Amino acid sequence: MKLSVHLGRLMLQNPIVLASGTCGYGREMQPYLNLNDFGAITVKGLSLLPCEGNPPPRIWEVRAGILNSIGLENKGVGRFLEEDLPFLENLSTRIFVNIWGRTVDEYVAVARELDKIARIDALELNLSCPNVEKGGASFVADLEELRKLVRGVRAATGKFLIAKLGPQVRDWEATVTLLEEEGIEALSVTNSFPALALDVERMSFIFALKTAGLSGPAIKPLALRMVYELVGITGLPIIGMGGITTADDALEFLLVGARAVGIGTANLVDPSSAMRILEGMQQYLMRKGITDIEEIIGRVR
């Protein structure tokens, strides 16, 4: 059975990608999964300098999902290269690194540092985090700023470039056209949805920033529609994500045209879920008598 898929010039041994922010720097998942079994692992968002993130609480469980307000907490690119790269270099799976900054220059600086590392296969530009005031989603609100950002990063690295987009995008066609013009090679869609939760006993907001990002099964139909519509307006390969917890969830994204799928919140509920989903996809293909997973990509349009 052939499970490999192409994201443009990048080949994955299978379509399963561990999504950024849900598998740490990779080592955290080692007790639960053989990371070499998957198409790629995406390291959590890295900034130029360490970031403490938002004050607690950072996670709040709701029906059919979770709210998070991590605030892109991370150790910074320097410590990542020193402490985590040696572990990742021993893996055979693809290594994606999610990057972010509060300014264009910060994004470019992180991209330039990671460009020096041959073992890193792709950079994923975080353009969609709803839990920081500057950076992330704020760039997609201004297309000229977005163009400067992507153009700067593209000039700083020859790595495969992925843009991670969320529901904050106002004009999908204009945004995606710009990204393609400036050298983005694939899209990750979608990130969490801005949402709200209150503590009725304390009569206050749960999170310090009031709103947080909703992910998990609650957003899957929304994310699936988003990917379906994007496949109709762009030729860029798409990594579909948003509430995937079962093999059928993942297959839905492939059937509407995604070329890979990101497993996110499910990792937080059951760290071994990615293997269960991969095995379920294989069983589906066997049951259908399909020998090449490419045969189902975009089959339902």
Image (cartoon, grey):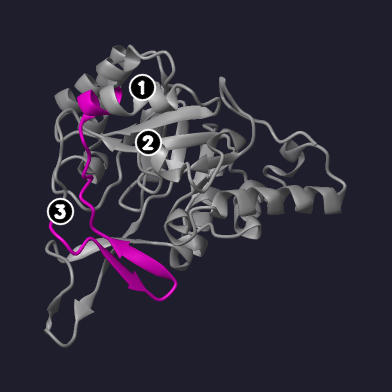
Between circles 1 and 2, the one closer to the viewer is: 2
Dot 2 alpha-carbon crowd within 10 angstroms: few under 14, some 14 to 19, many 20 or more: many
First in sequence: mark 1 vs mark 2: 2
- Determine which residue is flagged by label 2: 43
Q: Does the magenta stretch include residue 62?
A: yes
- Determine which residue is flagged by label 1: 182
Measure the C-alpha gap from mark 1 to mark 2: 24 Å
Callouts 2 and 3 close, C-beta under 8 Å: no
Give whichever of 65, 103 is nearer the camera: 65
Q: Is residue 256 visible?
A: no
Dot 3 alpha-carbon crowd within 10 angstroms: few under 14, some 14 to 19, many 20 or more: some
Q: Identify which amino acid the numbered label 3 is placed on.
A: Asn
Query: Measured from the top left, where is residue 48 in percent x and y?
Result: 18, 28
Query: Measured from the top left, where is residue 187 in percent x and y?
Result: 45, 36
Give whichever of 166, 213 is nearer the camera: 213
| Number of marks in the rendered image | 3
Callout 3 secondary element: loop
Q: Is residue 172 magenta?
A: no
Measure the C-alpha gap from mark 2 to mark 3: 19 Å
Give whichever of 144, 96 is nearer the camera: 96
Callout 2 secondary element: strand
Q: Which mark is drawn over residue 92? A: none
Dot 1 alpha-carbon crowd within 10 angstroms: few under 14, some 14 to 19, many 20 or more: some
Q: Which residue is drawn at 46% across and 55% down?
A: 242
First in sequence: mark 2 vs mark 3: 2
Q: Identify which amino acid the numbered label 2 is placed on.
A: Val
Q: Which mark is drawn over residue 54? A: 3
Residues rendered magenta in the picture: 55-81
